[in-house]
Amino acid sequence: MTPRHIAVIDIGKTNAKLAIVDAHDLSEIDVITRPNVVLDGPPYPHFDVKAIWTFLLNGLGEFKKRIGIDAISITTHGAACALIAPDGALAAPILDYEYSGPDDLTADYDAIRPGFEETGSPRLPMGLNLGAQLHWQFAQDPGLRDRTGSIVTYPQFWGHQLAGVLASDVSSLGCHTDLWNPSEAQYSSLVERLSIADKMAPARRSAKVLGPVLPQISAQTGLNPDTPVHCGIHDSNASLLPHVLNRTAPFSVVSTGTWVVVMSVAGEKKTLDPSRDTLVNVNALGDPVPSARFMGGREFELGMNGHISTGNEQTRAAVAQDGPMLLPALVPESGPFQGQHHSWLGSVPLPGTQERAAALAFYLALMTAECLSLTGHTGPIFVEGPFAKNKGFCEMLTAATNCTVVATDTTTGTSQGAALLALNGRALCTAFEGTRYLPQQHRSYEQYANTWRRALTARLDRRD
C-alpha cells in the first residue's frame, strides 16, 4: 500500500529535523527542528545522539497522534558512522568530523588509503574522510576494534535505532569515505587494510526497507507495529534523487546548507581534480555522479558575522556595477581553492549591511559556478535549500554559467528526496519547480563574474 504520510528524519550538520511529507505532492505538512549539538567530550567531540533520539521519539509520537505516519525515511549529513557493539549499543561516541584529531595521523593514514582512481574520494582534512576517522579512533583506543561488532553509516544508525537492523547505504558510503569503490559498487581495499571487512554492515540501496519499527518503538510512540523503516540516504543525494527520477539529463543540482554540493548528471566528461575538492558521489540508484563542494553555508555565516540579510535589488545592482568583491576562501580547508585565504577587492563592507550581503551572495554563486565547471556541468541548474531563496546568489549563478537556474520552492530538498524512498519514485515532483532565472538578463553581473575570475587568476599566479 502506498503511504500517505512519510516521516523524514533529517540530521544536518547544523540542525536535526523531523518532517511529515505528504506523499501526493511531497509538500511538508509540518517540520520541527533542534540544534545538532556537539559535545566536547570525553573522549573527543561527538554528536549528542541521546538528545536527538529523545527529540525524534517525542516528535514521532506527536506527529503520529496529530497527522498519522505510514512510513519512515532517513537522511543525514555524510562523514559520520556508528560503531555498534554486539549488544546493539554504541561501542564509542559518534565522532564530529570537524575535529582535527585524525590530522595527527595523516602520514600513517596516507600510507594505507587507496588512490582517488579507486575511490573517487579526495584527501580531506579532519575527519571528512570516514576512513581517516576510523583509523584514528582505533589508534587512540586499541580495544575499540574488538569491541565493535558492526560499522554502519550515519543514516543507518538511526535506522538501527528504529528497526534493529544493521546496514549501510550506497550513497553514504560513496560520500568521500575512502571505503567505497564507485566503479565496482563494492567496498574498497581500505576495509581490508583497516581489518574491518567483517565488521562493515551490508551495503544496501537507499530505498530498501530495513524492517518494521521495533515493538518498543511502537509502544513508546504509538506508531503502528508494521510501520516500515527505509534504509536512508546521504542528504545531498536526497536532494538529487527527485531530479534523477523525473528529469531528462543533462542537468546539475546544487544542494545548499552548511555545505554546497554540486552534482552534475550526464554532463561533459572531465578528469576530476581531487586537490580542488571534487569527488565521485554515488546516487540512490548506486550510480557514480561527478561532484564538487565547498562549505558555502558556513562561509555565509562567517561572512555575515551573525547578521541575516540577502541584500535588496538596488544594492545588488550597485555592487554588480562597482564592487566590492570577495575572493576565496572564508573556509580555506575545503572547496576548489583550498589553502587560499579570503581578501576583499574594493572597500570592505561592514557586516550587517546590504552591500556586504550582496557581495557575499555573489561570491557564493561564483564559487558554485567554479564547482559546476570542474564537474563538466551542462544544462539547467536546480538549486535546493536555503540559497534558493537568495536572489543575488541565483542571479549571479545564471550570469556566471550562462545557464538557466531554477530556484526550487521547497524549504529543503532533502526531506522530499528522502520521502521518495518510501514511494519508489512514484510521486509527481511538482514541488520541485520554482523561480526560473534566465541567462543574459544581467549584463553587469556577467562583467562582475569575469572581473572576479581575472582577479582570482592574477592572485593565484602571484602566489605560484
Image (tube, rainbow, N blue to C red):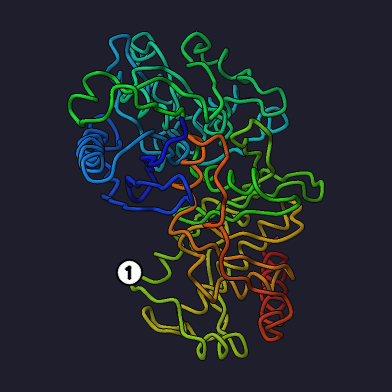
Q: Is residue 120 left or right of residue 331?
A: right
- Considering every residue shown, the one lying at the far front of the view is 1
- The quadrant the C terminus occupies is bottom right
Q: Tell me the element at label 1.
A: loop
In the image, is residue 433 above or below residue 62?
Answer: below
Q: Nearer the viewer, residue 117 or 373?
A: 373
Residue 69 appearing in the image = yes
Q: Is residue 258 left or right of residue 93?
A: right
Q: Is residue 329 left or right of residue 11?
A: right
In the image, is residue 324 above or below residue 49?
Answer: below
**Badge 1: few (under 14), some or many (20 or more) residues near its Cα, within 10 Å?**
few
How many numbered marks are there? 1
Q: Residue at x 51, y 36 (%)?
A: 423
User: Which corner quadrant of the image does residue 307 belong to?
Assistant: bottom left
Q: Residue at x 47, y 50 (%)?
A: 26
In the image, is residue 304 above or below residue 128?
Answer: below
Say which amino acid is labelled 1: Gly
Q: Residue at x 29, y 33 (%)?
A: 44
Q: Nearer the viewer, residue 113 or 108?
A: 113
Q: Nearer the viewer, residue 187 or 103?
A: 187
Q: Is residue 269 left or right of residue 346?
A: right
Q: Nearer the viewer, residue 416 or 156?
A: 416
User: Which corner quadrant of the image does residue 148 belong to?
Assistant: top left
For label 1, the residue is 306
Across and down, in percent, residue 154 comes to 41, 31
